[in-house]
Image (cartoon, rainbow, N blue to C red):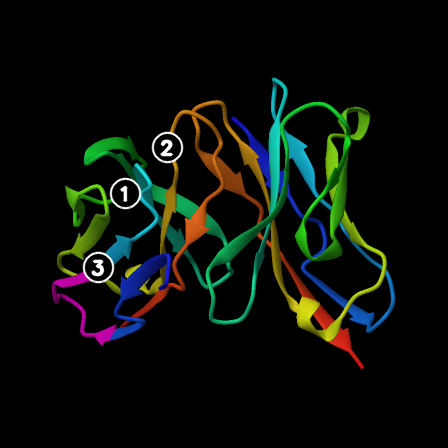
Amino acid sequence: AQSVTQPDIHITVSEGASLELRCNYSYGATPYLFWYVQSPGQGLQLLLKYFSGDTLVQGIKGFEAEFKRSQSSFNLRKPSVHWSDAAEYFCAVGDGDYKLSFGAGTTVTVRA
Amino acid sequence: DTAVSQTPKYLVTQMGNDKSIKCEQNLGHDTMYWYKQDSKKFLKIMFSYNNKELIINETVPNRFSPKSPDKAHLNLHINSLELGDSAVYFCASSLDRGRYEKLFFGSGTQLSVL
């Protein structure tokens, strides 16, 4: 069965600094990978997704993620965070039956 | 103008009661979902409907019954509420089930069972 691990429960970063969120997946076949963001009191919003092709994926809000098959990872990055990036970030993997399995999330706090 | 709207936003009730959460999407999508997010923010799918047909039914107690009167609506009825049902319930929709389409989420219903 597929699974997703987000090793960092909480990350604090200064405004303007770079951000990297880790995601490791376990899946036998070619994975379908996603990053979603949840702002306080809101539902989840898709940041980006990887199905195939270029392993560096660009998303909305200046985010990008890199798929590394050898490391079973799909880490999310942003070069310079803004205070509005404070949120909960979820990595997810598709299971081949059109269901998503989500990680436990990483809370990002941005300090001024 | 909200794409996926669910009501109520907050629901506080006693153990043993029966309650419903309603969800509507105005995106013209064929597929709708219910997800449960527990206190540790772990998000897990409960049900999915495609064009009013149940296509995903995870291991969920029988006390939970989804109903889709049409493809724009997916309601969740919960009988005999228990303390462990306290969570945030998210409705979502996607264009169809044939691909990993982008999910559009509602803003959630926070259910507190006392």
Residue that mark 2 sits on: B96
Q: Position of residue B95 (x, y in %)?
A: 39, 37
Viewport quadrant of the C terminus of chain B:
bottom left
Residue that mark 3 sits on: B22
User: Quick check: B27 above or below B40?
Assistant: above
Region in magenta: B12-22
Chain of the residue that carries numbered disc 1 in the rendered image: B
User: Quick check: A89 above or below B56?
Assistant: below
* Front residue (pair B15, A77): A77
Disc 3 marks which amino acid? Lys
Q: Callout 1: few (<14), some (14-19), or many (20+) C-alpha neighbours within 10 Å? A: few
Which numbered disc, 2 or 3, marks the residue that appears first in the sequence?
3
Cα distance between the residues tagged 2 and 3: 20 Å
Labelled disc at residue B60: 1
Of badges 2 and 3, the one in the foreground is 2
Chain of the residue that carries numbered disc 2 in the rendered image: B
Q: Callout 2: few (<14), some (14-19), or many (20+) C-alpha neighbours within 10 Å? A: some
Viewport quadrant of the N terminus of chain B:
bottom left
Disc 2 marks which amino acid? Asp
Which numbered disc, 3 or 1, marks the residue that appears first in the sequence?
3
